[in-house]
Image: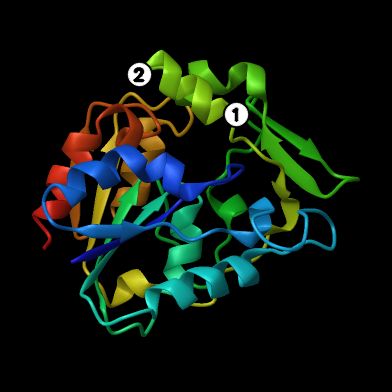
Amino acid sequence: MRVVFVHGACVRDGPWWWHRAAAALRRRGHASVSPALPSCGEGDRPAGPEGPGLTEDVAAVRAVLREGDAPTVVVAHSYGGIVVAEAAVGVDVVRHLVLASSYLPEPGETLSTFGAAAPPPYLDFDLDGGTFGVRPELFAETFAQDCPPDIARDAAARLVRQTLAVTQQPVQAAAWHDLPATYLVCTEDRGTPVAAQRAFSRRADRVIEVRTGHHPFLSEPQTVADIIATLA
């Protein structure tokens, strides 16, 4: 089995975010990969008003999903669920979707569809510059309070500005209509309220609650690996 991990918004270096769970999966004989997301500046164009958006993210992930013929589980974190909803459609090797504190959007829905009426305090929006990002001073206490201190520090170093347009660009398809989906509710998440996660999870086939913050693959990597391994 191959695992493809799609990271969330406003960060770079997916393999780093996934490295602790990847190591646990390797010990079980499962390979994994994490594609770059162009809207986060992980490409040849910077984020911004004319920068890459959801379309480019979908294309990047879809290209990785189509590599090889190994049965594949796609793990989407946060914004990654918006990308995967479209990217995984019609890719024969994909067997299962796992959503961690994430979204299962219908066609036509956007990231902003699921947002609160007022912008959350931990995000900074630059309308003129066409980007948004996480406020570094609020990152650890909001998103990594249950991670080891060195992991939280290294995670904060990977924050980036992302093209703001992705919050308004609608998905064109919903892979979870045709694929089994497991939703991981992170009950200690301070970024995405647990009540919101449970609402999102109603579209999934199976729901598992884990006692973690926003990044379970960093704070409890063995737990995440164990869940994924049962899907092999």
Q: Amino acid at mark 1?
A: Ala
Disc with the residue nearer the chain's start (1 vs 2)? 2
What is the three-letter code of the residue carrying label 2? Asp
Give yes or no for contact between labels 1 and 2 (Cβ–Cβ under 8 Å): no
Q: Residue at x 73, y 41 (%)?
A: 132
Query: Which residue is found at the position 25% from the left and 73% from the top?
Result: 179
**Numbered disc 2: secondary structure:** loop
Name the mark on residue 122.
Answer: none
Looking at the image, residue 19 sits to the left or right of residue 156; the answer is left
Pick the quarter of the image with the N terminus.
bottom left
Q: Position of residue 202 (x, y in %)?
A: 28, 53
- Label 2 neighbour load within 10 Å: few <14, some 14-19, many 20+: many
Q: From this viewpoint, is residue 203 visible?
A: no
> Height in image: 89 above or below 231?
below
Q: Which mark is residue 146?
A: 2
Q: Within 10 angstroms of label 1, few (less than 14), some, or many (20 or more) residues?
A: few
* Residue bearing mark 1: 157
Question: Where is residue 186 drawn, in percent x and y?
Answer: 31, 33
In the depicted structure, whether residue 23 falls above or below residue 110: above
- The answer to whether 78 is drawn above or below residue 145 in the figure is below
Measured as percent of width and height from the top left, residue 145 is found at: 41, 17
**Quadrant in the picture for residue 16:** top left
Task: Choose mark 1 or mark 2, whichever is in front.
Answer: 1
Q: How is the image coloured?
A: rainbow
In which quadrant of the rendered view does residue 125 lie? top right
Tell me: residue 84, above or below residue 113.
below
Splitting the image into 4 quarters, where does residue 108 fall? Answer: bottom right
Q: Is residue 12 visible?
A: yes
Seen from the viewer's position, the closer of residues 24 and 202 is: 24
Give the Cα separation between the discs numbered 1 and 2. Answer: 17 Å
Image side of residue 148 versus residue 29, left or right: right
State the image coordinates of residue 190 (x, y, percent, origin top left): 44, 24
